[in-house]
Amino acid sequence: MVSNMDIGRAMTIRLDPSLPEMPDFAPGIRRAPDRGFRLTEAQVKAALKNALRYVPEEHHEGLAPEFLEELKTRGRIYAYRYRPPGRIYARPIEQYKGNCIAGKAFQVMIENNLDFEVALYPYELVTYGETGSVCQNWLQYRLIKQYLEALTEEQTLVVMSGHPLGLFPSPFEAPRVIITNGLMVGLYDNHEDWEIAAQMGVSSYGQMTAGGWMYIGPQGIVHGTFNTLLSAGRLKLQIPADGDLGGRLFISSGLGGMSGAQPKAVEIAGGVGVIAEVDGSRIQTRLDQGWVNRATADLDEAFSLAGEAIVSKEPLSIAYHGNVVDLLEHAVSRDIKVDLLSDQTSCHAPYDGGYCPQGLSFEDRTSMLSKDRNRFKEFVDRSLRRHFELIRTLVGRGSYFFDYGNSFMKAVFDAGVKEISRNGHDEKEGFIWPSYVEEIMGPELFDYGYGPFRWVCLSGKSEDLVKTDRAAMFSIDPDRRGQDRDNYIWVRDAHKHNLVVGSQARILYQDAAGRVRIALKFNKMVRRGEIGPVMIGRDHHDVSGTDSPFRETANIRDGSNVTADMAVHCFAGNAARGMSLVALHNGGGVGIGKAINGGFGLVLDGSKEVDEIIKSALLWDVTCGVARRAWARNENSLSAGIDFNREYKGAGQMTLPYAVDEGLIDRVTEHQALLSSVPESERG
Ligand SMILES: NC(=O)c1ccc[n+]([C@@H]2O[C@H](COP(=O)([O-])OP(=O)(O)OC[C@H]3O[C@@H](n4cnc5c(N)ncnc54)[C@H](O)[C@@H]3O)[C@@H](O)[C@H]2O)c1
C-alpha cells in the first residue's frame, strides 16, 4: 500500500508543508454569494477528500472541518487559508521567478485576472461574468504558480478545470500550457450536473478569458461594444458611415466585469447611455475608474440628465442605481424614446445570482439566494417575464433591441415565455429578436475574420503600450473597408480614452492578415529591444474560437450551429502550430452545455521561431472560422474565402460551397410535398 510519505517523496514540486495563516479579508472587496450547498453525504465526503489531497496529511484533521464549513456556507471549497496575503496583481515580468519566458509570462496573466482592481470576486478566484474563474481554489493557484516557476521549454503544464495535472515532457515547439475548463460528457452536459461536479471540486467554470488567463479588464469588451453600438446605429438608425451616435439613447444593464464596458463604449461612440446596476459597489468602481460619468438612484434625474445630453448631442453615460426592470417601467410609462436597447445582466447563470429580480434589492437577493433558492427562482422567473413584456412594448414603439451575448432570451424562454422563441416551442430556430451576433457582429465582423485581437506589454511599461499602439495603427489601411477605418480610429485614440485597468493591455479588432502583420511587427520590435516581451491573444468570443448557437455562431444557418467541431479544431490546430497556451472551455458567456469555446496566448520573445508560429498559427486561428462560415454560405465569408484561396494558392485552400438555386429547391420540395399528400396506394 502506498503511504503518504511515499507520495510526498515522489514529488519535488508540491505545496509548502507549513500551514499558512488564515489571511485577513480586505474590507470593501466584493465577495461571491453563497452558491448553495446541495451535495449528498457521499458527495460531501468525496469533496473533502478531493480538496485535502493537495495537502500533507498532518494538516488534514485541522483543515477538514474548515473546508466543510466553506462548502456548507459558500457552496464551494475555496481553501481561503491558502490565498497569499496582500495584493495580487500583474507585476513587470522580470519580477517573476521562472525557467522560461512563458512560465513567467503566464504568472503575469494569472495575477492580472486576480487583481482586486480587475477581478469581480478576487477572494473566490472569479475574474468576471459572475462565475468565471481562474481556477477553483487557492490550493490549485499555489500549485499552478509553482509549476509555472519550474516550467522549462521542454515541458507542458496541463491544467484540467483548474487542477494542475502536472508537468510533462514535450518538444520545444509544443504549447507550454494546455487548459480545459468545465468540459462534460454529453449526458451530463447541463448546469445541474456541472454544479455538483463543481461543488465536489472536479470542475471549473472558466467563462472565456478568466480560465484561459487572458483577461484584460473591461477594456476587453469596449472595442466590441463600441463596434456593436456604432454598427447598430448604422444598420437600424440610418446613421451615416462617418457619423456617430450623437443625440441617441442607449439603455442597458450591468456595470460588472464585461458589462462595465457599456458606458465607456457608448460615450466613445458619441451617444447617451443609461445603464442600470443593482450593486452600488460596482457603480462606485466604475465611477472611480472614470468608466461611467454620472450616477443616480433617481429615475427622473437619470432621464433628465440623459434628455439634456440628447438635445445637446453631448456624449454622456449615466449609471442608474436600481433594477433594469424598474428603469424600463419608467421609460414605458413616460413614453421615453429609446433608440437602442439591450441587457447585460449575467443571464447565463440567472438562478445563481447573475440576475437580480425586480422587487429585491441587491442585498435581499444575496440573502434569499442562500436561504431559499426555490423562492429566488420564482422571483427571477416573474421578473424576466415582466422584463420581456416591457422590451416588447418598447420594440413596438420603435426601439431596436438586441441580445448582447448574455443568454438573456434563453433565460426568458426558460422562465416560461415560449413566445420569445421563433418556432414557439424550442430555441433551435432562434428567438424573435436578434442577438448582436446574428445581425451585427456576425455578418459585419466575424464573417470577414475581424475579431478581438489583444496584447499585453509584459514589461508593465505604459510607454511600451504607446509604441505598440502606434505600430498597430500604421499596420492598418483605413481606406480598405469601413471596419478598417473604425479600427484605425480606435487604436489611434485608444490611449486618450484611458482604457487600461490592470496590465498594460490593448484590444484591437483585426482580421487574419491584420493580426499576422501586427504580431510580426511587434515581434521585430521585441527583437530590436525597442519594447519588452509581449503576450498576444484574443477573447474566445471570436471568429473561430467559439461554437454557440446562442451567440458566436448564431448567424450560421446551415444547421451546424448546434455542432462544436469548429471550436475544437481551432484549439487543436493552435496547439499543433505551437501557440504558447491553448485553452478549451464549456459554457463561456452563455452557460454550461450552450457553448464550446477556446483561446490562446502566444509570447512574443523576439525570436525567429516565433515569427514562424505567428505566420501559421495566427493565420489558422482566424481562417478556420472564416472557412466554416464560408461553408455555411455566409456571404461575407465567401468573399474572404475567395481572397484567401487567391492569396495562398498552392500553399492552402478552403473548400467553398456552390450556390444552389432556391427556385429549384422550392420546386423539388413542392413536388415531394405533393407526392407525400398522395396515398401510397395511388402512387405510380
Ligand atoms: N457580449 C459579450 O461579448 C459578452 C462578453 C462577455 C460576457 N458576456 C455576458 O454578459 C453578461 C455580463 O457579464 P459581466 O462580466 O459584466 O458579468 P457581471 O456578473 O460581472 O455583471 C453583471 C452585472 O449585472 C448586475 N445586475 C444583475 N441583475 C440586474 C438587474 N436586474 N438590474 C440591474 N443590474 C443587474 C449585477 O449586479 C452585475 O454587476 C454575462 O452573462 C456574460 O457571460 C457577454
Image (cartoon, grey):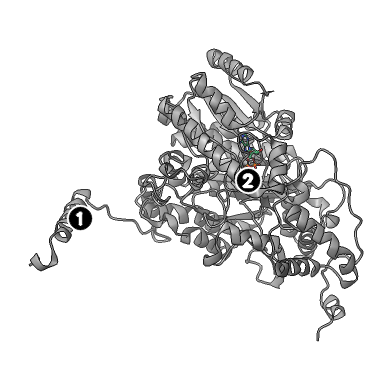
Asked if residue 231 shows in the view, the reply is no
Secondary-structure class at tag 2:
helix
| Relative height, residue 372 to residue 302 (above, below) | below
Q: Residue at x 47, y 33 (%)?
A: 389
> Within the displayed image, which quadrant is ligand 1 positioned in?
top right
What's the residue type where badge 1 is placed? Thr
Q: Along the polypeptide, which appears first: circle 2 or circle 1?
A: 2
Q: Name the image quarter holding the C terminus.
A: bottom left
Give the foreground label among 2 and 1: 2
What's the residue type where badge 2 is placed? Arg
Q: Which label is found at residue 669?
A: 1
Residue 513 locus on image (x, y percent): 49, 48
**Is 526 placed left or right of 626 in the picture?**
right
Question: CA–CA distance between discs 2 and 1?
Answer: 50 Å
Residue 500 locus on image (x, y percent): 70, 37
Asked if residue 560 shows in the view, the reply is yes
Q: Residue at x 24, y 53 (%)?
A: 660
Residue placed most toward the observer, 661 or 652? 661
Residue placed most toward the observer, 581 or 129? 129
> For residue 671, what is the image quadrant?
bottom left
Is ligand 1 closer than 8 angstroms to the Cβ of mark 2? no
Secondary-structure class at tag 1:
helix
Q: Determine crowd level at label 1: few under 14, some 14-19, many 20+ residues with C-alpha closer than 10 A.
A: few
Residue 678 locus on image (x, y percent): 12, 60
Kindly give the residue lying farthest to the bottom in the view shown.
1
Residue denoted by label 2? 375
